């Protein structure tokens, strides 16, 4: 298994291009199932999760071709000859459940394996089921699979999500585009990935209003057409690389970066004493003098502080001046990076969903590993400023969500290399 070796070596300078968003692309791809005409995505990220979604769509009968070195995904679903999303694919990636809404809307039936829990929490699907049932679907759980059918077709309805779930909002939104009549989703998720999905669906002919607000209104149409859509910038990759010069020192321009994608995160960096400048090409981030100040963080749905940047923020807080308290409110088990950071000399106490980080002057390199994507990248960030060498194992997590990580970091002067395992 491959590892990544990071040698702490001080200031980073230069620019890092930010890719299209993994989590947007993973919901835009299943949107191909809604139409017989081709859907093309540009600015797609080159990630193993995208390959997994490609495999899943192909298993259903979609044609998916990766063009332009993987940055363009040309998809066509004129002939869907299978309606079963198999456990063998779904278990690899929870986002596979995003084929449920579109298949149900287009075909009137779908069988999708329940993804089960994952390292960061139990992650049930009750909200997806609640919303689709409101639209008239009949859903049964049999042998670990959700069997969904809409014998009389889907019908628009008003509903209120008990929690603003990203995935549930996406599944319901996609299904509602082809339902008869009006659907109102109250307490909908407001993440930029939802707005991106709505933009793409509108380009396909859907009638949607209110995306980006807590109430989304969809007027169902009979059919959707083909479209070409650029995937929005990855705000989590952006936030992650913004922290590289903050942790290691220096000044880096993040190409394609936008403050409106991660306002709450930028406010925290500002309070910590980091300089962020909007440029014509993106965002320039610098830490020029001394240590950053400790700040407290509470994760929340958008526009709050993203849970997907909590681990990386913790890596920064390890060497901040003072004590910071990080509260994780979205997932119940998302502090697996804390003991690993502890092996590098961080002083962190975890109690339930709260981590208290007492800043130390310096971290020390160590062999570490993590059990999820964001936890893994937090260890890479920590390694950038640590004394000595940090070997981050289980690199396959990073391959799921960070394209060309080694190339991007070495491009700004970091000493990072991939070590091929046996
Ligand atoms: N939840 C329920 N019932 C449901 C759905 C969700 O209780 O039916 C709970 C979950 O268990 C969790 C919370 O609601 O505690 C939030 O889950 P949500 O549905 O919002 O998350 P998701 O759609 O499963 C997406 C991202 C995650 C990101 C979360 C929160 C994708 C493919 N994944 O997951 O990304 O953390 O939203 O912003 O879009 C990552 O990229 O590393 C990642 C985990």
Image: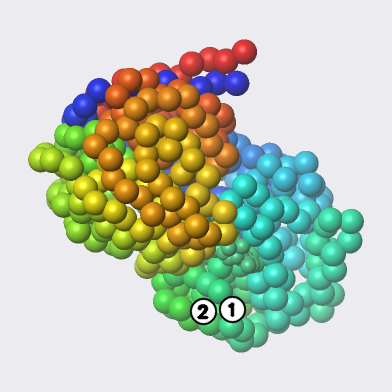
Q: Quadrant of the N terminus?
A: top right
> Looking at the image, which is closer to me, 274 or 253?
274
- Percent from the top left, x then y, of residue 176? 63, 74
**Residue 203 vertical placement versus 230 (above, below):** below
For the residue carrying disc 2, how many other residues have a C-alpha within 10 Å: few (<14), some (14-19), or many (20+)? Answer: some
**Residue 163 vertical placement versus 382 (above, below):** below
User: Does 336 sit left or right of 9 as displayed?
Assistant: right
Marks 2 & 1, CB-CB < 8 Å contact: yes
Residue at figure coordinates x 48%, y 36% from the top left? 340
Residue at figure coordinates x 31%, y 29% from the top left? 386
User: Does 201 sit left or right of 303 as displayed?
Assistant: right
Query: On residue 187, which mark appears?
Result: 2
**Residue 114 vertical placement versus 254 (above, below):** below
- Percent from the top left, x then y, of residue 233? 37, 50
Instruction: Say which element carries label 1.
Output: loop
Counting labels gives: 2
Report ligand 1 position as a quadrant. Answer: bottom right
Instruction: Say which element carries label 2.
Output: loop
Q: Which residue is mark 1?
A: 162
Residue at figure coordinates x 45%, y 67% from the top left? 301
> Looking at the image, which is closer to me, 177 or 252?
252
- Percent from the top left, x then y, of residue 73? 53, 41
- Percent from the top left, x then y, of residue 261? 33, 58
* Distance from the alpha carbon under mark 2 to that under mark 1: 7 Å
């Amino acid at each position: 298994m491959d590892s990544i070796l990071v040698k702490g070596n001080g200031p980073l300078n230069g620019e890092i291009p930010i890719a299209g968003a993994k989590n947007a692309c993973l919901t835009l791809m299943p949107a191909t199932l809604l139409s017989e005409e081709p859907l093309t995505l540009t600015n797609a990220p080159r990630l193993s999760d995208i390959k997994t979604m490609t495999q899943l769509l192909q298993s259903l009968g979609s044609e998916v071709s990766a063009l332009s070195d993987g940055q363009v995904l040309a998809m066509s679903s004129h002939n869907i000859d299978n309606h079963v999303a198999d456990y063998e694919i779904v278990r690899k990636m929870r986002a596979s459940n995003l084929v449920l809404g579109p298949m149900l809307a287009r075909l009137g039936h779908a069988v999708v394996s329940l993804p089960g829990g994952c390292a960061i929490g139990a992650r049930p699907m009750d909200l997806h089921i609640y919303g689709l049932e409101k639209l008239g679907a009949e859903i049964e759980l049999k042998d670990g699979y959700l069997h969904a059918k809409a014998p009389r077709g889907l019908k628009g309805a008003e509903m209120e999500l008990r929690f603003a779930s990203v995935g549930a909002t996406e599944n319901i939104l996609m299904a509602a585009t082809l339902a008869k009549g009006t659907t109102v989703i109250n307490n909908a998720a407001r993440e930029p990935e939802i707005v991106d999905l709505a933009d793409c669906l509108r380009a396909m002919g859907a009638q949607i209003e209110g995306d980006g607000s807590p109430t989304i209104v969809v007027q169902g149409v009979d059919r959707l057409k083909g479209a070409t859509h650029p995937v929005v910038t990855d705000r989590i990759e952006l936030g992650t690389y913004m922290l590289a010069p903050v942790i290691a020192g220096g000044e880096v321009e993040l190409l394609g970066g936008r403050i409106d994608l991660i306002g709450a995160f930028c406010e925290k960096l500002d309070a910590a004493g980091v300089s962020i400048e909007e440029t014509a090409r993106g965002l320039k981030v610098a830490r020029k003098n001394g240590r950053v100040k400790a700040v407290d963080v509470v994760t929340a749905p958008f526009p709050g502080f993203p849970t997907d940047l909590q681990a990386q923020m913790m890596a920064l807080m390890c060497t901040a001046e003072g004590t910071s308290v990080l509260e994780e409110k979205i997932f119940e088990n998302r502090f697996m990076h804390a003991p690993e950071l502890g092996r590098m000399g961080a002083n962190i106490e975890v109690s339930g969903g709260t981590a208290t980080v007492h800043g130390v002057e310096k971290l020390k390199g160590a062999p570490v590993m993590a059990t999820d994507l964001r936890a893994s990248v937090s260890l890479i960030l920590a390694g950038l400023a640590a004394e000595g060498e940090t070997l981050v194992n289980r690199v396959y997590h990073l391959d799921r969500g960070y394209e060309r990580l080694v190339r991007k970091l070495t491009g700004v002067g970091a000493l990072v290399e991939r070590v091929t395992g046996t």
